[in-house]
Amino acid sequence: MNKVETFANSCAETVPLDHQPGRVYFLSCDAPDFPIKIGFATGMTARKSSHQTSLPYDVVILAEMVGTRRTERGLLRHFKKQRLRGEWFRRHPELMEVIARVNDGKPPFPPNLELQQHIDAVRARWHMM
C-alpha cells in the first residue's frame, strides 16, 4: 500500500459511515416494468455483479451519482409510497423523472429556491461565500 492509499484509508476510518462518499444508483433489469432498486455502493462494478447473480435478467444501471448512505436514505424515504419491498420500487413517473435528471448531470430534485436563499444568507453572515 502506498502513502496515498494509507492516508485515504486513515481518513475513511474517521469519517462516519453516513458521510463516506460513494455512488447512489438506480438499478433495474432489462425487462418490461421490472422494479427499480435505489442503492448505495463504493464499488459499482462489484455491486452490479452481485445483483446480476441473483436476478433473472440482465442488470442495467439506469443512473448513478455521487452521494452517501444519507443521500440514499433520503431517496428511499421520498419514494416510500412506491416501495415494493426493501429498496425496490415501482416504476413511477416521478422516479423516472429523477433518473432522467441524474442522467442529465442535475441534482435529483429541482432546487428549493427559498431554502437556497436561506443557505446563501447564512453563508454570507458567516463569510463562507
Image (cartoon, rainbow, N blue to C red):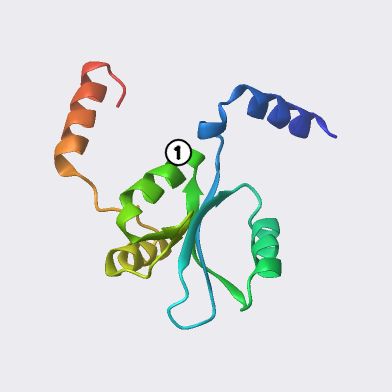
Residue 81: x percent and y percent? Answer: 30, 56
The reply, left or right, for residue 118 in relation to residue 99 is left
The reply, left or right, for residue 44 in relation to residue 6 is left
Crowd tier of the residue under label 1, counting other residues whose Cα lies within 10 Å: few below 14, some 14–19, many 20 or above: some
Establish if 32 lies above or below 45. Answer: below
Q: What residue is shown at x 51% (from left), y 82% (from top)? A: 31
Q: Residue furthest right?
A: 1
Query: The C terminus appears in which quarter of the rendering?
Result: top left
Establish if 36 lies above or below 15. Answer: below
- Answer with the quarter of the image where residue 11 lies: top right
Q: Of residues 126 and 66, which is closer to you in this image?
A: 66
The reply, left or right, for residue 40 in relation to residue 94 is right
Residue 119: x percent and y percent? Answer: 23, 30
Mark 1 highlights which residue?
A: 70
Q: Residue furthest front?
A: 85
Residue 49: x percent and y percent? Answer: 70, 64
Q: Of residues 85 and 62, which is closer to you in this image?
A: 85
Regarding mark 1 in the picture, which secondary structure is present there? Answer: helix
Amino acid type, callout 1: Arg
Q: What residue is shown at x 62% (from left), y 22% (from top)? A: 14
Q: Residue furthest top?
A: 126
Q: Of residues 16 and 124, which is closer to you in this image?
A: 16
